[in-house]
Amino acid sequence: MRTSQYLLSTLKETPANAEVISHQFMLRAGLVRAVASGLYTWLPTGLKVLKKVENIVREEMDRAGGIEMLMPMVQPADLWQESGRWEDYGPELLRLKDRHNRSFVLGPTHEEVITKLLSFELNSYKQLPLTMYQIQTKFRDEIRPRFGVMRSREFLMKDAYSFHLSQQCLEQTYQKLHQAYCNIFDRLGLDYRPVLADTGSIGGDASHEFHVLAESGEDDIAFSDSSDYAANIEKAEALAPSGERAPATMELNKVATPDTHSISDVCEFFNIAASQVAKTLLVIGEGEEGVTAPVVALVLRGDHDLNEIKAEKIDGVASPLTFASDAQIEAAANCNAGSIGPIAIGCKVIVDRSAAHLNDFTCGANESGYHYNGANFERDISDYEVADIRNIVAGDPSPCGQGTLTIKRGIEVGHIFQLGEKYAKAMGAAVLNDNGKNQILTMGCYGIGISRIVAAAIEQNNDANGIIWPDAIAPFKVVIIPMNMHKSARVKDTAEQLYSELLAAGVEVIIDDRKERPGVMFKDMELIGIPHSIIIGERNLDNKEVEYKNRREADKSILKIDEVVEFIKTK
RNA sequence: CGGUGAUUAGCGCAGCUUGGUAGCGCACUUGGUUUGGGUCCAAGGGGUCGCAAGUUCGAAUCUUGCAUCACCGACCA
């Protein structure tokens, strides 16, 4: 490729509405342009990277036994009604009508289509197990698209679906694809971790996410410091504190605490640590249809945060988790939100494991402007349940039993699920088993965000000058930068000769043949992040030499001209 | 959807308080200059100031409504 006949589209200045590094560099390096919120055009350089990621994913999926196919992006509503997700998926599902007023959706994922298809195509257990995949555009009407292509509405995804007759068989394929995902992220050259995950709206039993570690990530990942345990903080279990709860030593004592609402107010007022305070949150409970929903009190230690995913799974708590309104709080606890407490509250009380270990603690008195201190379980609060409802914090013991947890930020680039029979049952996907009986299929599904990987790779590989691509996904492997080619026939001839030789050797090379000053070329090529540069100037040609620079290193080195092609090929 | 802020040339911004000729830097075109890290000089092209209504002799500027975009919260590859 020649820059003079290409669309580089680099920008000197950072567009004002790009916040994260990857978005800034993707715009500046001419990889993408926004069309509307969450919708992007991929420019030539960006598309090259996207295709490289796609091909690595395709190769590893094929190697793991996947079979590629392609399903439509527009899907009929009745498939979604059949699975029940027409109601369940919510507004993120973009619905539309055709000219005949028939309803369709823009596919956010393809369980319905694939399962329906295979309910027709599969007849016998002899055809199983089967793993199908596609690499295709998805649409999710995100509430708030952000971070460029990292959370866009339209994006490129690899989605795979596996079909089995037994859980055991599903687990084998799940393991195989888990390994395939590791191979993919290894080849991409990314620092990533597979972590235990919540199954979310897709449903099912077991699940792992693959996270690229980066400060700009939207998820918190908990790691054990002495085992390979890793879990999304949504999922990571907070163990009960060890040992017995200390006995009560104080009397229950009601104290007037005017203008004391937050945990920090209470700590300051009583001069105690947040870990000695119990905070009480009221959420909506599961009520019968038509009846006013009851509230449920969730009790946590003052220094801990509620884990909403864990809480909404508890029997009696409405899902999705909904906090009580001020009016509901007033009605249930006779006080404002700053003075709620678990003592004699008159509703279901669920206490976090760590909070349940407290003795002589401080809590709201269910009377505006009053708190108790010296509160103790059993003596003061008898009717309660204990559950794990908090987020783990750094320093907590690992649920695996070894080591303590640390927390890092991650970008979710892959997610694999064991779905079980959910979709197969809904869509009537069954085959005859070896006893000649009809049997519902068991499924797994496996996603990778191709376009998100491009952004994640930049988040993890950049410096002040721009992107530093991992070699496997660089848009070009090497750039030839001739110094003042228009003034020196020698420089021009050498550059053109090397360009031809590299092309002939099958190397992805771009030559910067613009009539630009050297500084401009260096800046542009560093911004775009091409891993290897060959710099050709008068000063080295007398010795039949050129310079080589690696994007990751500060210093240049000297190469003999006739060694360049071999040298680059070994990189 | 709630909160916050923004919208003036392709990009980054000023002008608005106090209404009166639409500006600066980068980029682009032309000429010259320079040539190993975003040269310098000069001359140019490009804007219905997000849209609509209102106030006014006159609106980028004041008022109202709407739209779009970004950031913080709940969702997810």
Image: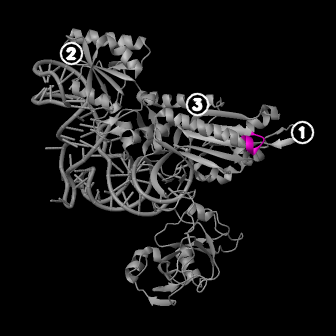
Callout 3–callout 1 Cβ contact below 8 Å: no
**Residue A361 located within the stretch drawn in magenta:** no
Q: Give the crowd class for mark 3: few <14, some 14-19, many >=20 residues within 10 Å.
A: some
Q: Note whether A542 is above or below A84 in the view shown.
A: above
> Which structural element holds mark 3?
helix
Chain containing mark 2: A
- Residues at marks 2 and 1, CA–CA distance in whole angstroms: 78 Å
Q: Residue at x 55, y 34 (%)?
A: A183
Report x, y in % for residue B25. 18, 37
**One can see residue A50 in this view:** yes
Q: Which mark is residue A25?
A: none
Q: Are marks 2 and 1 on the same chain?
A: yes
Q: Which residue is mark 1?
A: A435
Q: Please tell me which of labels 2 and 3 falls first in the chain.
A: 3
Side (left or right) of A246 relative to A164 = left
Report x, y in % for residue A111. 68, 42
Examine the image and state in which quarter residue A121 appears: top right
Q: Which residue is mark 3?
A: A60
Q: Is A12 or B49 nearer to us in this picture?
A: A12
Side (left or right) of A47 relative to A321 = left
Q: Which residue is mark 2?
A: A540
> Which structural element holds mark 2?
helix
Callout 2–callout 3 Cβ contact below 8 Å: no
Q: Give the crowd class for mark 2: few <14, some 14-19, many >=20 residues within 10 Å.
A: some
